[in-house]
Image (cartoon, rainbow, N blue to C red):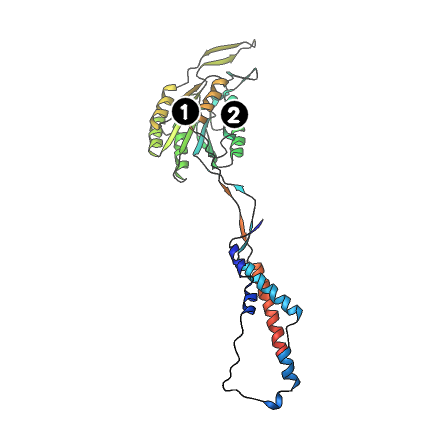
Amino acid sequence: MMVLEWPWALLALPLPLLARALPRAKESVGVALKLPFQAGSPAVVGAAVRRPSRLRLTLAILAWGLLVLAAGRPQWVGEPMALPVAGRDLMLALDISGSMDQEDYELNGRPVSRLGVVQAVAVRFVERRDQDRLGLILFGTRAYLQTPLTFDAATVATMLGEAVVGLAGRETAIGDAIGLAIKRFREQPEGNRVLILLTDGENTAGALDPLVAARLAAQSGVRIHTIGIGGGEVGIRTPFGLRLRRPSADFDPETLKRIAAVTGGRFFSASSREQLETVYAELDRLEPNERDERTYRPVRALFVWPASVSLLVTAWLAVGSMRARG
């Protein structure tokens, strides 16, 4: 819609009428050059009685009205647009090592791999964080930045859902994943930095020790919440189709607890889909998604249009007046 930034400028519209209503100055009775022989001249008489035509008067009024309108600074205000307001920078570091292919979870009554259940639950968590800046790191033997920090939660959810076991190697480099997250956080302005680390094993690869990385994270203001995937029994399929179970030997909850403690975060263990959903609900409580009601309405100045038209009309009247006198 169109609005006037200075509507009080419209009070100047009746100024020409006010000027016309003022008393005229009295004719001077001092020295004057009298030309009696021209008193009856048709040219002098015509000049005395000439009045502006109706068209010229209308155009003069139009030029003045447009000039006053331009002085009021008309603007076109667009529809409100929501501004993304980040409560925090939140990075997910997801383990896609070989052990994440173990099918020791159930989803809709069917066995599903650890990565599969993490993807099913984490995607919904990511989609709820539409006011946070999100990023995704995938790690195995090496750590890779899959998605840099962005407000595009839909893209992060898509990339998370497309993760594949073994894509980054079969081992587990937890320390390198934390180090990569710290590096990416440092490239952004200071803020509320949170890393959610999801892994099912102990650190078996990489150049950086997880606890050293945790101390670096604490120095950088990064809070790490660790989620232990599995940690219960591992399913094994036999040639007869039976599904035997044995305790998982590669799970290292003590290191994950220390990582969380050093950085001021929390450790969670999720040995079932229901527990994993509870973990994400708790993370929503610990790291609430701030929803500031900030909007922006684009504004485009329009004063140049009435001002330009007024200038053109005034120039046309001036040229016409000069021709009439000539």
Out of 113 and 205, give the one closest to the viewer: 113
Is 104 drawn above or below residue 183 in the view shown?
A: above
Question: How far is disc 2 from disc 1 in space, using C-alphas?
Answer: 16 Å
Residue 235 drawn at (x, y percent): 50, 13
Q: Amino acid at mark 1?
A: Thr
Residue 62 drawn at (x, y percent): 61, 63
Residue 74 numbered mark, or none: none
- Quadrant of the snapshot with the C terminus: bottom right
Q: Which residue carries the number 2 mark?
A: 119
- Residue at (50% x, 29% y) in the render: 126
Q: Which residue carries the number 1 mark?
A: 226
Q: Amino acid at mark 2?
A: Gln
Residue 13 drawn at (x, y percent): 56, 61
Is residue 53 in sight in this rendering?
yes
Q: Quadrant of residue 269?
A: top left
Indicate which disc, 2 or 1, sits on the residue closer to the N terminus.
2
Is 53 drawn above or below residue 172 in the view shown?
A: below
Secondary structure at numbered mark 2: helix
Q: Residues within 10 Å of mark 1 (few under 14, many from 20)?
A: many
